Amino acid sequence: MSFTECIALALFDWHHSTFRLPVIKQSMHPDGSLTLRRRNALDRFPNELLSTIFFFAIERHDEPNTLTISPTTISHICHRWRQVALATGNLWTNIVLTFPTSSEQLTRTLTWLSRSKTYPLDILLDFRDPEWDWEGEETHGFRWADMEAVLRLLLPSAARWRTFELLTDTWAPIFVFLLRTQKLNVLEHLEKLHLARCNAYFARKGQLFEPTALGQHLPLFDEEAAVPRLREVTLTGVHIAWSAPPLANLTTLELKYQAADVMPTVTQFAQILSRCPNLEVLAIVGRGPQLTTNEEVPASAGGSAEAAVARALRGTIKLRGVTQFIFGFVDVNYAIQLLSLFDLPSLRDLNLEDVSASLRHQPPDDAGQLFDWITATPCDSPLDVDDSVNALSTSLGPFPLAQLHTLALHSIHAPLSAFVRLYQACTGIEDLRLCEVADCAMEALETAAGSKLPLEVCSTSRADALPRLQTLFVRAANEHLFSRVVRTRGSDLDASFEASTLTEYTDDNY
């Protein structure tokens, strides 16, 4: 039922009820005379209906001081509206603190926490400084003591947290949060948790965690914490004690932009996933679990330790419910070894990104090996990969490519033949997104009839690439090539082109 329908039904019930407010209202003039005026429609609304309208009218998830309609604004309209607003606890549940913090922000937070009564809270703490020079954590304006002050206000209401999002530039505030919440054991309302140290630098190949003095793995809440409703967890640049985290029954798990040396082992990672049988969305951006630790399989004579681990554990992480997989890599060989662990029989949406290209710290990897492995079959093993990768590519691959509905490729560079082979395997794709990719990605889309592909690529048995394609989005690529592909594919294709490219990371990256 829509909001409009709810209001209409409420008004209908009110109109046909036996109780009525007076239809006229008296007002006293300074000279002592009385004037009777008819009540307007809002005056006749019952408090319960007025409260519902207030709830749907307020804006959320922004800085409260800049909102057009906020609970504070409503409470300052008139005496009656103020009474109703102060009595409506769920108007005051959206707690937002931003950098730079001030005494006014902290006072407002304390007031809203009191007015929210016993309702679950949605908390956003955004302490990123757009003017920070990235030269050193000690130069940042939001420090350890500032986070302590914020937590002193929020921790008494922890049992009411419903969503909790903490965004910082540096590690110290995250460390303080983990340190001060490690004894929390009652979080019965918490549904969504997002902790982000928004510094993609740590995803770089070979980069280790800094500052080393604060690198210990702190627990996420109490080991025995009751978090029965937690379903979505995003850890961006944030590591925890992976051995016993309260991560169970999740539907979404995202691990992004982590330093390699603080990630969980394969065994710890598999244990976390095994406790989430209903997982639907999995994102690994930058680096996944460590494949070379003392607890894992030693290297064989013919390959690396990572390859030996991947061979031993190939296909052991079966995620039956995952329909969307987001994977960003900085090393193609590691990517193949990691992906070999998964079995994703229900996958529908696949997002692949070469993160190293986005970080601009090295030339983009040749993803041809990755595509060759993804599309390999037991009798069709790629010949142009090294032995450690080739040993893995004799499996069916982790993804049921023919049943994919959506494919997104970001900053991917590979030979034309690799894109052709990928598209041939993804026969069910209806939605394709290409962002900052090599021209080959679009050239491979041309139909067999209008193709300019070399003869060795266009075999006689080759069907048109992505025959079910309905929607194509391309960003920051060759516009003339895009136009040619659209003309070749025909008028049934819903195609759009965006010339601009992201020059810096936005909130969506974190």
Image (cartoon, grey):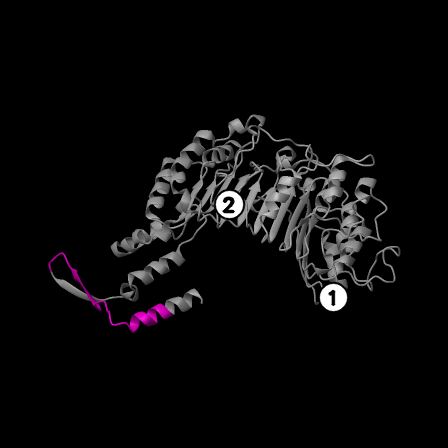
Tell me the quarter of the image containing the N terminus. Answer: bottom left
* 127 with respect to 427 (left or right): left
Q: What is the tally of numbered marks visible in this picture?
A: 2
Labels 2 & 1 near each other (Cβ < 8 A) = no
Residue interval drawn in magenta = 9-32
- Disc assigned to residue 329: none
Q: Nearer the viewer, mark 2 or mark 1?
A: 2
Query: Residue at label 2?
Result: 193
Viewer-closest of 240 and 506: 240
Secondary structure of the residue carrying numbered label 2: strand
The stretch drawn in magenta includes residue 147: no
Q: Looking at the image, is mark 2 or mark 1 earlier in the sequence?
A: 2
Residue at image coords 54%, 46%: 233
* Residue 318 in picture, x, y percent from top left: 67, 51
**Name of the residue lying farthest toward the bottom:** 16
Amino acid type of the residue that numbered disc 1 sits on in the rendered structure = Gly
Viewer-closest of 132 and 166: 166
Viewer-closest of 397 and 199: 397
* Residue 65 in picture, x, y percent from top left: 39, 45
Establish if 463 lies above or below 113.
below
* Residue 119 in picture, x, y percent from top left: 38, 50
Residue 21 in which image quadrant: bottom left
Alpha carbons under labels 2 and 1: distance apart = 45 Å
* 510 with respect to 298 (left or right): left
Query: Residue at label 1?
Result: 490
Amino acid type of the residue that numbered disc 2 sits on in the rendered structure = Leu
* 24 with respect to 343 (left or right): left
Q: Is any atom of residue 443 visible in this view?
A: yes
Residue at image coords 75%, 48%: 438
Q: Residues within 10 Å of mark 1 (few under 14, many from 20)?
A: few
Tell me the quarter of the image containing the C terminus. Answer: top right
The stretch drawn in magenta includes residue 25: yes
